[in-house]
Amino acid sequence: MIKVENVSKDYELDNGTKVTALKNVSFEVEEGEIVGIMGKSGSGKTTLLRALRGVEHIDEGSVTVGDVTVKAGQSQFYYNNLKKETAIHLQRSFGLWPDTVRENVLRKLYARNYFDESDTNFETAESEFGDEADELLELVSLTHKADHYASVLSGGEKQRLIMARQLAKQPKALLLDEPATMACPKTKQEILDAVKKINKELNITVIVVSHLPDVQKYLADRVILLEDGEIADEGTPEEICDKFMEDMQPIVDIQNVATDEDVIEAKDLKKRFYLLTGGEVLEMEDISFKVQNENILSIIGPSGAGKTVLLRMLGGLEDPDEGDVMYYVDGEWRDIEIPGISRMKIRSKLGFMHQEFSLVHYSTVLSQLATRLGYKNQDIVKDAQERARKIGIGEELLDSFYLLTDLPETEAKHRLEQIGLDAEILNDLFPRFPETATKEAVADIFENLDLDLDILPRRSYELSGGQQVRVMLALILVSRPKFLLLDEPFGDLDPVTLRDVTNSLKKISKEYGITIVMISHNTDFIKELSNRAIFMDDGKIIDDSENIDEIVDNFIDFCHADYLKGGC
């Protein structure tokens, strides 16, 4: 059904360096088979999937899906035919319409016949495809979210909606690139079961790229291992997963123990969300806890429990309806809700890494590091006050601008555009660091994160997925924050690379005395790194414990995550 013969693909970087993504790759997949592809970050997995999809031109060889064959050197016309045979769910892809869940699926079904999602006639779509839309939502377990807007879905729910939209195209082959990357164990189980159901009931051939051994063992009939763009081995999921994990480093022998000093306090937080169509989406109440200096605290719970909302309230990016978030900075308690210089002092010591983070696409790594050090450095508050006075900006407005530096770039730009300002104003108030000083500041962070300084002149799009995650982490750590908030940023990393990052975080947090509050769905990562965990469900804290193994095991049981228990 799928045949890949002697496929090779090279990329040329802006500096003229050639990088080999695929080298002489050949394999076949039978109709209705589920084949897994494993490999470390940068091994060529996503490039191979994009070649199967028809969006990546190959340099050598041929790709066949069903009755369509594409050979190296052929025009885009032939590659477009592959797109008709396949559907793909790309890593970190959240491109959805600002409509309800059901309307998002109806748009894709309408486009199957009428070719234009943007011009969907919902009356026609409902009459022709309403039943099919309902079937697809049931297939991916989103029936109960049908009338919710896509923007209010959790990360895991967005993943399932994207899968439903892909199935609407009636593909012969479904290509999944880390389809459950950001999902909690409960949602991941639902996604994996949906893939099995799709494969069995629709007889769709599935290629699933995943670096998670548990996922491959649960889903795949057989697994292909990629190393440096070549097929290194092929066999049963058990055989290949064992081989893949051979190079994993041991857990670093560092015990991160919190002090008795409270440095963060959440007091009686409440937050409610409603749909425009009516009905409450989430009610958070009675959220109170303290975080001690050098704590590594994990917030765990199913998708939609309120974890990200809570983290954004801790970061001052979301205001609670009631309650306070306090930080102990420079010898006194400060409220992160109260605008002004006091809040800027909190932010100057705060790093926030978002779930849907993005690097500046065309900017070099060095340039982004220099910009970040301009936002967060020892003298930033004092220097920014002086610049603001010169151009007539008051302290509260300056603080509002400073808040934007902790938001994802696209969200920050959108907020500035809403008031008619250009993002360049941030560079005027918080000018970038000199490049020489930046190189010196980042050297030890790069070493701890196993990043080569040679990537400093590279642009973001020239980095592998794993490198992008570690560079983003370097951007946050380069200013030596006192507080670090992490919203599931490491889901893209394979277990071998994640172990390296975990060890690095343990060393860095110990060396610089960083207090970490993080969200993660990776149970092994939580057990290795955390010294405390808070378990949330439905907007409430249901457990708070320093017994990490016990609270995580309870979470796995709560999620009925059979894939983590060797279920099949």
Image: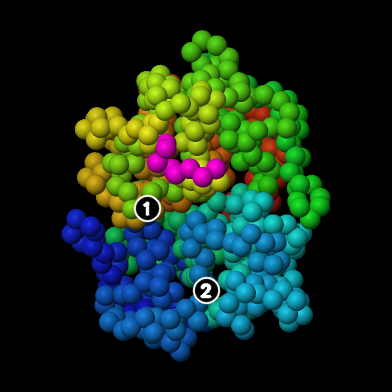
Position of the C terminus by quadrant: bottom right
- Is 420 rendered above or below residue 55? above
In the image, is 551 to the left or to the right of 429? right
In the picture as drawn, the residue positioned furthest to the top comes out as: 331
Which residue position holds label 2? 87
Residue 141 x/y as whole percent = 70, 62
Residue at the (48%, 13%) spot, across then down: 330
Residue at the (43%, 22%) spot, across then down: 389
Magenta stretch holds residue 319: no
Q: Does any portion of residue 269 appear in the rendered image?
A: yes
Ranked by sequence position, the earlier of labels 1 and 2 is: 2
> Which SS class for mark 1?
loop
Provide the residue span drawn in magenta.
Answer: 419-426
The secondary structure making up most of the magenta span is loop
> Which SS class for mark 2?
strand
**Number of marks in the rendered image:** 2
Q: Quadrant of residue 10?
A: bottom left
Residue at the (64%, 28%) spot, across then down: 545
Mark 1: amino acid:
His
Instruction: For label 1, count other residues whose C-alpha is less than 10 Å away and answer few (under 14), some (14-19) or many (20+).
Output: few
Alpha carbon of mark 1 to alpha carbon of mark 2: how far?
Answer: 25 Å
Q: Nearer the viewer, mark 1 or mark 2?
A: 1
Q: Nearer the viewer, residue 190 or 540?
A: 540
| Color theme of the render | rainbow
Which residue position holds label 1? 361
Q: Are marks 1 and 2 in contact (CB under 8 Å)?
A: no
Mark 2: amino acid:
Ala
- Is 458 rendered above or below residue 135? above
Q: Quadrant of residue 234?
A: bottom left
Residue at the (39%, 81%) spot, across then down: 79
In the image, is 384 to the left or to the right of 195? left
